[in-house]
Amino acid sequence: MNPAVALGARVAAAGCLATSGVIHAELYLHGYRTIPGVGPAFLLQASGALAVAVLLLPTATVVPRLAAAGLALGALGGFAASRTMGVFGFIEYGLQPAPQALISVLVEIATLAVLAIPLVHRTPTCRALSLQSSER
């Protein structure tokens, strides 16, 4: 993979994940901290997202990328659960709180999309090697 594309993908993923972390931190500070179970989850999401965003920048290893994907998927899962069956007895409706809910969902989806770029953007040499090894 082109190093510039790989770096761009890491920077974009870190930016999206950090945005999610900031949103969760803001919501935690402005009321969610008082919700049993949900408050600590928001604090954990915010802390984890910001820490992993920093770790994504200097390295192309798989561990920070998997952690970023896990955090984004976890946030999306929590969002879906909070609007369907509830989380720790807490249920929200629609895209509330606005605009944080919508922005958070969008940046978490974007995080996953950008993390997938290295998986689909392979150089012709890598494809040729992959094809040669599968023919054996």
Image (cartoon, rainbow, N blue to C red):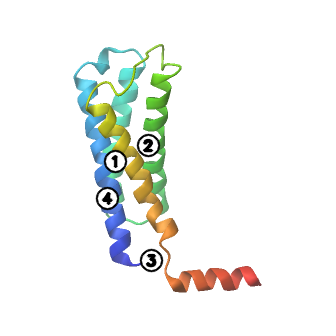
Q: CA distance from mark 3 to mark 4?
A: 16 Å
Q: Residues within 10 Å of mark 4 (few under 14, many from 20)?
A: many
Q: Earlier in the sequence, mark 3 or mark 4?
A: 3
Are the residues at dot 1 and dot 2 in contact (C-beta closer than 8 Å)?
yes
Q: CA distance from mark 2 to mark 4?
A: 15 Å
Looking at the image, residue 135 lies above or below residue 14: below
Quadrant that contains the C terminus: bottom right
User: x, y percentage for residue 124?
Assistant: 52, 84
Q: Earlier in the sequence, mark 3 or mark 1?
A: 3
User: x, y percentage for residue 113?
Assistant: 43, 55
Q: Secondary structure at mark 3?
A: loop
Q: Secondary structure at mark 1?
A: helix
Q: Earlier in the sequence, mark 1 or mark 2?
A: 1
| Left or right of residue 125, residue 23 in this image | left
Are the residues at dot 2 and dot 4 in contact (C-beta closer than 8 Å)?
no
Identify residue for label 3.
Answer: 1
Numbered circle sitting on residue 125: none
The amino acid type of the residue labelled 4 equals Ala
Q: Residues within 10 Å of mark 2 (few under 14, many from 20)?
A: many
Identify residue for label 2.
Answer: 71
Identify residue for label 4.
Answer: 12
